[in-house]
Image (cartoon, rainbow, N blue to C red):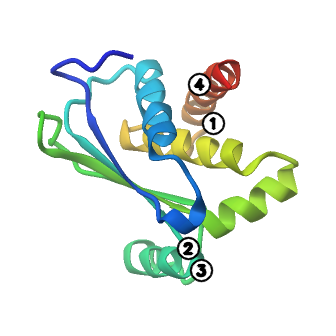
Amino acid sequence: MNRTAFAPLVVVRAPRRYGLRPAALRRTVELTLEYAPMRVAGEIGVAIIDDDEMRLLNRRYLNKDAPTDVLSFPLDGHACAGEPFGDIAISYDTARRQAQAYGATLAREIDRLLVHGVLHLCGYSHDRPREAARMHGIAKRVMRKLAQRA
């Protein structure tokens, strides 16, 4: 995807100990945005964190005292270039466990969580069956496209 004046800036914070490639994570975000009918020009932050950090975020923002796999923090009304659009946090520890449980690679599971988080930033939800079907349909298309690029 060629960056235009309306393309988001994707900032990735993935500690080196996890061995993830920030460029690959940025491409996953950009591809997901191609499938989500929303024009995003702001900044999207992606943080790969551990279960302890995720538990703190989940407790602080959702009053759930346990780690989770992915959290999205959309910032309403900030879709202008240079302004924040939202942030995504992914627990590396939880992603690793889930990848093993699903028989997937860790990279594939992190991509799945990242796609899910981006769709939440874009306003998608899985609270109602119809919304969930729409969100999961887009996620499947993105994941198929990612698999083709691998």
Q: Which residue does the numbered mark 1 point to in the structure image?
A: 129
Callout in the foreground (3, 2): 2
Q: Which amino acid does label 4 sit on?
A: Val
Q: Distance between the residues labelled 1 and 2?
A: 31 Å
Q: Which amino acid does label 2 sit on?
A: Asp
The x, y position of residue 46, in whole percent, is 40, 52
Callout in the foreground (4, 2): 2
Q: Which amino acid does label 3 sit on?
A: Ala
- Which comes sooner in the sequence, label 1 or label 2? 2
Q: How far apart are marks 1 and 3 (CA)?
A: 26 Å
Residue nearest the viewer, comparing 64 with 140: 140
Q: Distance between the residues labelled 3 and 4?
A: 29 Å
Say few, some or many: other residues with alpha carbon within 10 Å of mark 4 (under 14 / 14 to 19 / 20 or more). many
Q: What residue type is labelled 1?
A: Pro
Q: How far apart are marks 3 and 2 (CA)?
A: 12 Å
What numbered label is drawn on residue 50?
2
The x, y position of residue 125, in whole percent, is 49, 42
Q: How far apart are marks 4 and 1 (CA)?
A: 20 Å
Q: In which quarter of the image is residue 2?
A: top left
Question: CB under 8 Å between callouts 1 and 2?
Answer: no
